[in-house]
Amino acid sequence: MTFTILFGAALALLQNGLMVGAILFSLGLIGILSRRNLIVMFLSAELMLQGISVSLVAWSRYHGDFGGHVLVVFVLSVAACEAAIALVFVLQAFTRTGRLDSTAWQTLREATIDRSIDHEIPSLDTSLPNFPRLTPAGRSPPPDEQAAAQRDHV
Amino acid sequence: MSPSFLLILIPLLPLLAAIATIVCGRRLEHRAHLPAVIGLAAAAVVALALLVLTVRSRGSAETPRPIDITTTLWQWATIDNAYLPAIDSQAAVPGVAVGDDAYSARPFSISITMRLDPLTATMLTIITSIGLLVAIYSIGYMHGDPGYPRFFALVAMFVFSMSMLVAASNFLLVYVFWEAVGVCSYLLIGFWFQKPAAAKAAKKAFLVNRIGDFGLAVAVFLLWLTYGTLDFHDTFSSEGTILPGILGQTRLADIGGYVSGIVGTAICLLLLLAACGKSAQLPLHVWLPDAMEGPTPASALIHAATMVTAGVYLIARCAPLYMACPGALVMVSIVGTTTALVAALIGTVQNDLKRVLAYSTISQLGYMFACLGTGTLLGFTAAIFHLLTHAFFKALLFLGAGSVMHSMGGVIDMRRFGGLRKLMPVTAITFLIGSLALAGIAPFAGFFSKDEILTSLHSKGWPDVHHSVNDQHHATIPNMPSPHSRGNTIHNVGYREFSSYGENLKGTRTPETVGLDALNQPIVWRTLFWMALVTAGLTAFYTFRAVFMTFTGPLRVPEEAGDHAHESPSAMTTPLIVLAIPAIFIGFILFATEGLAHFLAATPSFTAPSVVSTATASVFHWDLAIQGTLAAALGVVIAAVGHLGRRSDGPQLERWLGPLRSFLEHHMFIDQFYIAIIIKPIKAISFIAALFEKHCIERFVELIAHLPLTLGGVTRRLQSGLLQRYALASVIGVLAIIVLLAWRL
């Protein structure tokens, strides 16, 4: 598909609408692929759906046909049902593992592949040497009578 | 009872008997011999009836005609237009078709056809009668053996294969049954296969036979290429023209019908190779002495009387082919006589009675080849005559040896027993009769056949002594279309300078010669004659050495004999007695009445003009008879000096032979020679091949096997179990599709 920028307000409107839809879709896609939180993944999926809806509306406005609008209404209702079911899944997943992390579910991997583990924060190495302690600034040391009695100056 | 029906019955009955024994042999237990014996007895009776019928149909002496009755059972294979002859007349197949379509394409068609002629009838009688006697003998010999039914099944199967071999009218069928008798021989030699020596001997026999079979296969290929057909008999094509068979009446009557030169000699030499393999002649004789590991009745049947005669039969059958190639004929004689002499020499120092008889068989077969190679009608007839007498007395000798072995508890080394004439009188007398026949003492059977062999060799070495038939107008042979008499004495041995061809051919052809034909000199034949005479003396020597060492002198019985050192049961002695009768009389009867000679001369193969023209007057040459008898008597006397009576228990004469003795005792080191030049290189090559296979081929295969594993290992890393990575994969896929579509549009 080659984008030809022609004159015409309808076309500009279409292009803007498709852009917005594409941006929404891609943000949702990136979200699904990179976020680990199950709820956020689902959120991103919804975002993808909404991106498609915007595109549909734009096309339908461009062609002057109401078919796209009707389809968007369907999509919205399906999205709502799907939200309900998906959140039930997320809840079940959380009940089983106590975590909302998608990397908690790795048991279907090949036997020869190791489990993917997050980088752990290295623990504190308490074997540091004893650094010398300076005297705290702004406080004079307590007087020493012995050293004061044998001083050779006033 | 037509002859065709009887001809089909003869192989059919042993086949049914073999199948019956295989199917219900185990259930019959000690009666497992019944199907085989009944089948073989019926086949023997039918063969005798067929012989009588065939003799009767010979016609009278004034108007004899060749006997040739063909029966086709079914059509086995047909490939249309398989043979396309060249248009060039020089390269045309000799006598392709009588008629104008000499250059038409011919089909490759093999029909299961059996052909009855005097040679076939004679061989069938020998095979079935000796088969029957061996089967009866085996009832006593194989008694108590765990493989009792298997033995009889194999004997019946063998008789079936051999009968079909001699009755088949097609070279391919001959090849099939040639192999079949080889298989039966292998199974019978290795009958006690748990014994490693027997298994090895069976393998050796089969492999050496295989070399001969290779020769036969290549000969069959060449025959097809040269003659355009593999049938013996003439067939009729769909247009009504005759397709001449290789040994059919049409080609036999055609003077230029057979190919000479390189191709013809090659065919004949390859057939000779096949015959050497089967009949244990010189380069390929090594399997026969080892074949004595098998049961003695099997040795008597196969390695004395029938299977080893298949080679002689083949060459006799292909007599017209050989007559066109004198070089090949000389080779046949040279091979035969050399084998006879070498085998006789080796047989003189053998201590194993069966080995002596084995080498004797090789030697006698060499005699048959020697006179086959003379290329005269007398030679061919004498070979079959000797085959007939040899079958009887050699089977008698082998069965007698088996009887001795049976009562000596399996011991067959002659140095360990002696003086058995009092212990086993029937065996002793029949063995003596067989030995007299083998040594060629008149008037026993072997004398006449050996005399004919010596006569045929003599007639080639000193041709002017013997007179051709046409010179004396002595017509004792069937009148075929008379060959043009162009001074055909026997100087040019059975192969005349043809100068007029083309009566049946388009275009003329002159006979070609090969270098081998130069061997056809009288000096060569004289050498062969003296070799044969010396062999006759040696034959008498080793035969009577065996007789004296076994049966004369003080009685000595080895301890393996135990309590059954007595005469064998009647099941074993009856065949001995029955065989002794022909061993005494058959030679004299057939010679005096010239019955066999006249009968065999009506065989189509022997009615070819090239064979008929070599017929000599049937005169009994007293000088040759005396020479033969002197040689035999000398052999007997020397054997008696060395081994008779009290001297029968030790190596008396062999001490004087010195180093020659050990050379002969080790079978002239031929086995070791073959091991060194054939077996060891093959083992080295196979060792290298095994190394190559292990390190190269196996590794390559393993490499291929590892490819899926590696590929799988790479793609396995995609399955991480992390949900978002899967989603990423699907997104990438969608993007790829979109990009693809964008570029397409």
Image: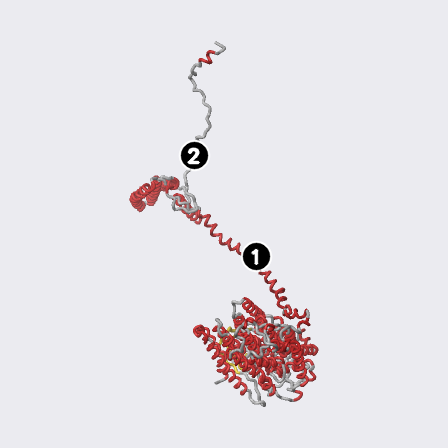
Q: Is residue B89 left or right of residue B724?
A: right
Evaluate if marks 2 and 1 touch, with contact meaning CB atoms under 8 Å apart: no
Residue B92 at what x, y percent from top left?
60, 75
User: In this view of the protein, can residue B511 be seen by the observer?
Assistant: no
- The one nearer the camera, B466 or A87, is B466
Find the residue positioned furthest to the top.
A154
| Position above or below: B681 against B147 | above
| Local secondary structure at mark 1 | helix
Q: Amino acid at mark 1?
A: Leu
Q: Determine which residue is flagged by label 2.
A: A122
- Chain ID at mark 1: B
Vertical placement of residue B443 versus B26, above or below = below
Task: Identify the residue under disc 1.
Answer: B691
**Residue B252 placement: quadrant:** bottom right
Per the model, the C-alpha gap separating discs 2 and 1 is: 58 Å
Kind of residue sitting beneath label 2: Pro
